[in-house]
Amino acid sequence: MERAITNRERFVVFGLAALLAYAVLRCVLLAITRAFWFDEIFTSVMAHLSGPTAIWRALQNAVDSNPPGFQLFEWALSRIIHNQELALRLPSILGFCVIVICLFLFVERRNGKTIALCCAALPLITVFFEPYAVEARPYVFVSACVSFALVCYQRAPAIRWMILLGLALAISQSMHYYSVFALVPFGIAELAFTAKNHRVRWPVWLALLVGFLPFIPCWPLLKAFGKYNGAHFWAQESIFSSQTFYSWFFKVPFALGIGVAAASILAILATMRSAPSTKAQDDGMTNARSSETPFEEHVLLIALILLPSIVFIATKVAYGAMTERYVLPAGLGIMIAAGYVLARLERNGVYIFAVFICFVVVFQEARFWQTQAHNRAALVSPAKAVENLVASAPTSNSCSELPIVIPNGQEFLPIAHYASSEYASRLVTLVDVTAAITYSGSDSLDQGLIALRGITPLRAIDYPTFAAEHDRFFLYTNGQSQFDWWPSRLMKEGETMTLVALEGSRKLYLVKLKASPGCENSTK
């Protein structure tokens, strides 16, 4: 039995190392072959400013929604690593690895190495891995800080671990404003400890205070961003939509996502009342220590799972905004809760769960590698399809100097960022805050583009100014977004729109504004 347990432990160590190696390889490959999307362009622009002073000034003008800590981290990496797609996404790649390791350490302490490895593999089938492990935004890195904070709290109130707890929470706060809400589950857990044991663990509370401190100097920046974006920010959620986090996190239907969250909470509650399977302990599948899980640890995990509801209530009271990725650390609680479920299964049950995870990962990754093979592991420029569509239009030669309007700002930024020199000077997006609210219900894109053009050359032009200078232009649309509303507006206002090229959902119009003189042979 001892020999079998030793071999199993070696296999677990090898499995964890292989998991991490694959994750790094896959993430690095995807990082250098995936083009930046809208939000990542903001990160790129901020990372290429002259220095900390310029970054702080840009944040005062509400250019980006993240604190200066994240911006400075990316600014430094952009100067160390030549490939910018990899440099700016490296924090997320490293963050994902930290999440895997910390999940293993947290679960192993209560439920043994085999179950810990199963739980450590769970992030690969969640949004932690795809898409956020390869994104130049702070969400996974923040979750990594919270996962490390969980490991530290598990060892409270040891002073060295409380120092690390405060440091982890402070770093997370310097990366994203909403990480301040990650302090709430820790605070609730510590209140539960105090109520149960009738004593205060001051080192823990000091660590939580240290974690909160970075929020204080950043408050004016957050307030400026909220004031600039106003009441029409795109991320406005209802109590129902806030609960979509669980299905979004695991990429499953809504009902199944809610079921997983409810089952996770019930599993934690059940753990408070019963010990794990004796057979599982005898087989070395779990630790005997699992029956000694402190009450406050259970409370911490339940509060962490309920983080979407906590943030929803807070943002409604404070008239803030919320979207699923702002509460990404909540997924950590669910994956740890899986360890409590597995600890109460017999050995075969644990193996069946492991096989299921392997099957899902293999199926998911087979599609990834097929896509990479099809693209020959090369970066696919989002501008290429637009350039080809324009070139295929019969009017492209006779109107070769006309502006090409990309009305959807989410599409415009990546297309303009990767456009060839031949087309870059012709690409334009239009800005009209009032119309944006009327047609899409949000002015976030227009406000973001206005702020961004204040710190970098950006052809985001106010519509009245553009219309006064250009009576004819090409208009590109794919019609697949609520922010692609300009074709509807132009048709409603009676402007002439002639379809000159079509490829799938992508359309290219030649637009003639009223009383325009025309372009020779433009419709031939």
Image (spheres, rainbow, N blue to C red):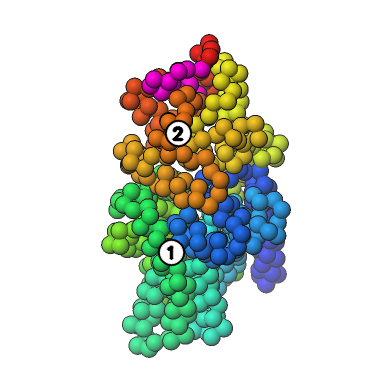
Residue 247, position as x, y percentages in the image: 42, 49
| Total number of numbered discs in the rendering | 2
What kind of element bears circle 1?
helix
| Left or right, residue 3 beside residue 440 | right
Q: Quadrant of residue 263?
A: bottom left
Q: Nearer the viewer, mark 1 or mark 2?
A: 2
Residue 457 is at least partly visible in this image = yes
- The residue stretch that appears in magenta: 507-519
Residue 223, position as x, y percentages in the image: 38, 63
Badge 2: residue crowd in 10 Å (few <14, some 14–19, many ≥20): some
Residue nearest the viewer, comparing 80 with 324: 80
Is 187 above or below relative to 257?
A: below
Q: Residue at x 70, y 60 (%)?
A: 80
Badge 1: residue crowd in 10 Å (few <14, some 14–19, many ≥20): many
Q: Amino acid at mark 2?
A: Phe
Is 473 above or below relative to 113?
A: above
Residue 94, position as x, y percentages in the image: 62, 60
Q: Residue at x 52, y 45 (%)?
A: 38
**Residue that numbered label 1 is attached to:** 221
Q: Is residue 513 magenta?
A: yes
Residue 334 is at least partly visible in this image = no
Q: How far apart are the alpha carbons under marks 1 and 2?
A: 32 Å
Q: Amino acid at mark 1?
A: Leu
**Residue that numbered label 2 is attached to:** 466
What quarter of the picture does the N terminus occupy? bottom right
- Disc marking residue 271: none
Q: Residue at x 40, y 53 (%)?
A: 323
